[in-house]
Amino acid sequence: MRLRNPKVSRRNSLNGEGDMKTVYLTVVLLFILLFAVHIVLTPRIYASLSVPAMWFAGTGLMGVFLGLLNIAYIRDGSPDGMKTVMVIASNVVALAFFLLGALLLGEVQAWIAVTLCTGQMAFSFLYRPGGGYRKEVEPT
Amino acid sequence: MMTRAYGLFSALIIFVAVLNIVMIGRLFNGLSAPALWFIGTNFMGMLLGLLNFFRIRANKRDWFITWKSIAANAVCLAFYILLAARLSTGRTWTVAAVAALLLITSILWKPSEEKSE
């Protein structure tokens, strides 16, 4: 028999009202949407499919892949330290990158990316896959 | 054997991306917007490798985890071929070849829980 660990279960809920998983997923989906728009806008910003245009589109793909990695982490549900480290490290590196980009470009959309990435990173820290189930210890 | 090949190609894609980021000084003078997009594109390569490592690590039959890896590999292969066609350097074609091998291994790879059935 498996019981929900109340300590971890509490961490995965927001003041007992909403499910952290849903909010985390919403932030990730918004993040993917932002970078899908970034990719779609490439032909509008660059006249031809030049090398700088490809770098620009590649950054958009990076955002989409980061979102996919987070969705896979939410879906997977098995408590594995290696996967958690992988996702958290990716989010931290991406946040540093977006922060650098926002400071360099100073555009609104860059700051939106920083905000969403901060949320994503915070949730990846707080979220515990599988709700932290533990096995009941059989009495001896 | 297939898991080793899959892990090796994932590691190679990450290695090339890290190498490109480290060597950014050779391509750009200072931190400009194109330099930023270049770093972002190489982060994409790193994340592609991580997506595949995540799938190996998860080792389960989940449609999302399977198809997100295969789709990401296919998109990246198309991206690297387009890039190699524009830059026409040996290194970019090598990266495209590694991406192609990564796509093939990601299609052929099966989780061990499936193999034992």
Image (spheres, grey):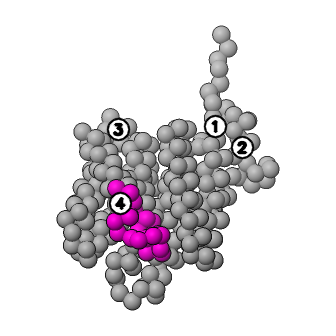
Q: Which residue is mark 1?
A: A132
Q: Which residue is mark 3?
A: B112
Q: Which residue is mark 2?
A: A11
For the residues marked 2 and 1, what is the alpha-carbon distance in whole angstroms? 10 Å
* Percent of width and height locating residue A129: 59, 43
For the residues marked 4 and 2, what is the alpha-carbon distance in whole angstroms? 42 Å
Q: Nearer the viewer, residue A21 or B9?
A: B9
Q: Chain of mark 1?
A: A
Task: Give the number of the disc on residue B23.
Answer: 4
Amino acid type, mark 4? Met
Residue at 49% x, 46% y: name it: A86
What is the quadrant of the C terminus of chain A in the image? top right
Q: Is residue A85 above or below residue B42?
A: above
Assign a secondary structure to mark 4: loop
Q: Chain of mark 2?
A: A
> Is B37 part of what is drawn in magenta?
yes
Q: Quadrant of residue B71?
A: bottom left
- Look at discs 3 and 1 and give the one toward the viewer: 1
* Percent of width and height locating residue B42: 39, 62
In the displayed image of the protein, which residue is found farthest to the top?
Answer: A140
